[in-house]
Image: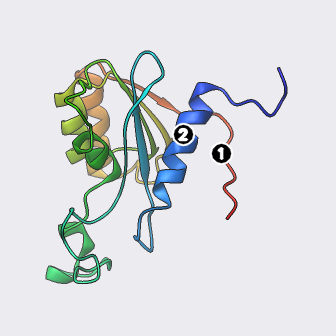
Amino acid sequence: MPASNINWDEYFMGISYLSSLRSKDPNTKVGACIVDKDHKVVSIGYNGMPRGCDEDELSWNKGEGLDSKYLYVCHAEFNAILNTRDGAALQGCTLYVTLFPCNECTKAIIQTGIKEVVYHSNKYANTTETQASLKMLQLAGVKIRQYEGRVPEIKY
């Protein structure tokens, strides 16, 4: 097999990274890809504003009050779950995501029956929210593993 071939993890994490480039967040671009047991892509998502909301009218700043992006942005995992088409079931699927899920996205991951989370970065590992995510995923029996493959180089 030629060295240029990529394995399934590299392929799906590559899709996650490519999806993250759709985000207009100036600080943290996150992408997600949900796949079924047959290695079929079920859905993708990236962090962005809710559909129908003019992204230029909402804040992308880390500011306070109504000037905080945290009040508006839908995370990549949540968007991937919501973007699932044709009533596709997420039960037993694997979620590939460029950043470890927050506690709110983790609730949706568990509720939809996703069985595995493959993440690349966990830059917020020491936060209460991420620790809560880890605890919930473990309690729910969701397999968690850090991505160990190549990070795709995407050229424009």
Give residue 136's position: percent from left, percent from top: 23, 31
Q: Residue at x 28, y 49 (%)?
A: 79
Residue sitting farthest toward the right: 2
Q: Residue at x 43, y 55 (%)?
A: 30
Is 4 above or below relative to 123? Answer: above
Are dots 2 and 1 in contact, CB under 8 Å?
yes
Callout 2: few (<14), some (14-19), or many (20+) C-alpha neighbours within 10 Å?
Answer: many
Callout 1: few (<14), some (14-19), or many (20+) C-alpha neighbours within 10 Å?
Answer: few
Query: Sequence order check: which comes first, mark 2 or mark 1?
Result: 2
* Quadrant of image for the C terminus: bottom right
Specify the amino acid type for callout 2: Met
Q: Which residue is mark 2?
A: 13
Q: Which color scheme is applied?
A: rainbow
Closest to the observer, 53 or 102: 53
Is 119 above or below relative to 25? Answer: above
Closest to the observer, 143 or 89: 89
Q: Tag 1's secondary structure?
A: loop
| Left or right: residue 15 compared with residue 23 | right
Which mark, residue 75?
none
Q: In this orientation, does residue 117 appear? A: yes
Residue sitting farthest toward the front: 86
Q: Which residue is mark 1?
A: 151
Q: Residue at x 69, y 31 (%)?
A: 6
Give residue 121's position: percent from left, percent from top: 51, 47
Q: Residue at x 22, y 32 (%)?
A: 86
- Total numbered labels placed on residues in the image: 2
Specify the amino acid type for callout 1: Val
Is 59 above or below relative to 104? Answer: below
Q: Tag 2's secondary structure?
A: helix
Closest to the observer, 2 or 115: 2
